[in-house]
Amino acid sequence: MARVTITQVAAHAGVSVASASRALNGLIASPQTVAKVQHAAEKLGYVADATAQSLKRGRTNQLAYAVADIGNPVYVEMMTAVERVVSASGYRLVLSSMGTLSSSVDVVRDLSRGYVDGMILSPLRVTDELLAVLAKTPVPVVVLGHLPGRQSIDNVRADSLTAMRLVVDHLVAEGRSDVAFVNGPSDTTPGAFRRDGFAAAVAAHPEILARSVEAEDFTIAAGYAAARLVLSEESRPDAIVAANDLIGIGAIRAAEDFGLSIPGDIAVTGIDNTELAGVVRPGLTSVDLGAEERGRAAAELLLKRIMDPERPAHTIAIAPSLVVRGSSHARMPDPAPSPTREHTEHTDLNEEREAG
Amino acid sequence: MARVTITQVAAHAGVSVASASRALNGLIASPQTVAKVQHAAEKLGYVADATAQSLKRGRTNQLAYAVADIGNPVYVEMMTAVERVVSASGYRLVLSSMGTLSSSVDVVRDLSRGYVDGMILSPLRVTDELLAVLAKTPVPVVVLGHLPGRQSIDNVRADSLTAMRLVVDHLVAEGRSDVAFVNGPSDTTPGAFRRDGFAAAVAAHPEILARSVEAEDFTIAAGYAAARLVLSEESRPDAIVAANDLIGIGAIRAAEDFGLSIPGDIAVTGIDNTELAGVVRPGLTSVDLGAEERGRAAAELLLKRIMDPERPAHTIAIAPSLVVRGSSHARMPDPAPSPTREHTEHTDLNEEREAG
DNA sequence: GCATCCACTGTAAACGTTTACAGCACTCGA
DNA sequence: TCGAGTGCTGTAAACGTTTACAGTGGATGC
């Protein structure tokens, strides 16, 4: 399978490479030339080399979505939304993970070398080093997640503070008075904001007790372990606020292990409103941070920036909304699995309650 | 942020581009030259352009993992395994999804244009057209999933037939006698093999009743809908065999809706042994098809082929193993969420039973 | 019949690298 | 003193494309 070049196609068609190129790209060329060239290309199995084309054209038609934690379904959801938008604009989306294997800085630096025409980043931690690299990267970047201070970087963020207020207010309204927060690592961006959001939210309710613990990471297993710790304390909380759905599901399992009924003995809430929240029993009350909408917004921001690199940086914040399920509300029957998130959020059957 | 080229670096360092290139790539060059060039590169913020480098070197150092259904956690698991292997060999892994937006044929054709040095494919459907494209693509390919006939394509496959036998034998051993199979679309590769596997497995037990139904796709929601159909029939089965974990989870929810106790009234099993199987209650008995191992094997196969393109094609089949949980076995306490799959499969606490 | 335009074509120069090749200066052994 | 070797350097050609430019021939306008 040796590579066949446009030179061979041109020779086979009896025209110059320039004519061949023009014919193949639908530029000005006579019908006979087009026919000859297309026939030759077909026969030889010619496909234009992407690297050569990219080098000459100065763009790759590829965009990247770089994500820290692909194990979390919420990122898959965002990616799907991103892909829908960018593929409609003729770009191919590639996903690169920046996990334990490669630091986010390395990934950005690498992607900046010309592999892609733009990138969307969902980093778990925003370090000064990362900001420095982002500031000087020549390729358009959108950060999907909170950025500190005033950066001139396009940015789409969830509103974790409001999210925490929504759950805490909800729990208080449900009569809970001793709330434990199971955070993910607080040195991550979501961890930090949810920590602060929780603090602010409980401060508004001086009548309730509040405590916090930190899970190793944002996974079910870590949430399970951290929740066990909380539940082992002598005075048990009557509500667990988890920093995301995975931790929340771990907490449900831990409570179950302790023989506690949910929501009778203890309420549990999550964040992200992933499909999983509707699938576990009891259904996990969660705050929808608009993953789909954030993904879409980020993609659109990126496309606009590619169109107009001089454009001032925008920051878009998506409003969260509370989705109440059985894990926090006794009289809430848990609904059936629905084919799409849209239906879950606005179900005709009114099996879920939305607030916020 | 205009692109800075090696020519500028060379000029700034007062050497030729050749020397600059050699210095930057650690080839033979005097210490003074290296110092000057590195200093200049640093100062100007030079990063080598990836497309130019790829064009000249004839490789991109990128590999692709193309997957049909990124919403299914089992593919995420395989991807993680793939990434571990390829990144250890200095390659960057990009994921491209071939879903509803772009056909697998298009994705392969596109990737064949030189974007990547090799690819691993997990197609849901293997059409003749896809096989034709694969046969003539110039870039190394490994297919992760069953291939028909004798293709000269590196191939890693699960053993769906044995998997189905494992679950059916298990259910029969547990005393079930009326088993309903909820398949995914049977025009997909996994769907077809699981259909056939189920047929063969029940044929070995002439004493039991068997029936089948097909879900729209391999998702929770589709599994839920299909299971409802099965459960609505006048004579209800006492076991549901789902074609994968997501469908199985949907089936658990459906059974719950019908007020059935699991496994008392009805047993449910899945396939893939994803993390979710251990998280839902009751725990979902599932067959582990060795996703992690398959991913690793596929990656290694790909690396070997890149090393030696003339190498004969290999086919690797991974043996499945049954993981029994509460959904099919009354006396089975469901274990705690574990931090890793490895632990889940070989737990010291013996909370799960492995067979097969 | 001449100039003008038009549709099309080929030549050649790019894009930013890497690298084969030749050349240079110097050292070393004979 | 010479030849060969060594260590480094610059020139220039490639990689496979696209595209600016300068034609070409023929049709068309007057």
Image (spheres, coloured by chain):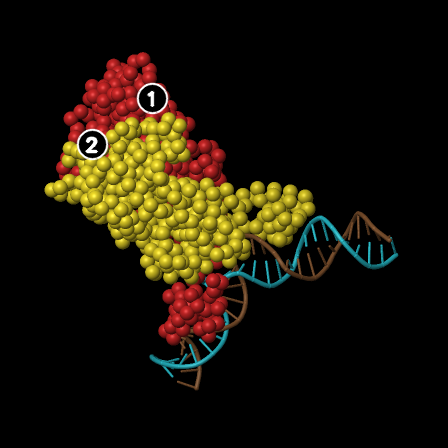
Chain colours: A yellow, B red, C cyan, D brown
Residue position marked by numbered label 2 in the rendering: A264
Q: Residue A22: horizontal and vertical position, in percent?
A: 62, 50
Residue at x 48% of width, y 68% of height? B8
Q: Nearest the camera: B137 or A205?
A: A205
User: Considering the numbered disc 1 on the image, is that residue within a helix, a strand or a loop?
Assistant: helix
Residue at x 41% of width, y 69% of height? B43
Most extreme residue toward the top is B234
Residue position marked by numbered label 1 in the rendering: B228
The residue under label 1 is which amino acid type? Arg
User: Considering the numbered disc 2 on the image, is that residue within a helix, a strand or a loop?
Assistant: loop
Label count reads 2
Q: Residue A332: horizontal and vertical position, in percent?
A: 28, 29
Residue at x 42% of width, y 61% of height? A136
Residue B147: tell me if it is visible: no
In this rendering, which labeled residue sits more in front, label 2 or label 1? 2
Q: Nearest the camera: B267 or B29?
A: B267
Q: How far apart are marks 2 and 1 (CA)?
A: 29 Å
* Protein chain holding label 1: B
Whether A14 is drawn above or below A237: the answer is below
Q: Is residue A241 left or right of residue A132?
A: left
Most extreme residue toward the front is A207
Q: Residue A179: horizontal and vertical position, in percent?
A: 21, 42
Q: Residue A159: horizontal and vertical position, in percent?
A: 35, 47
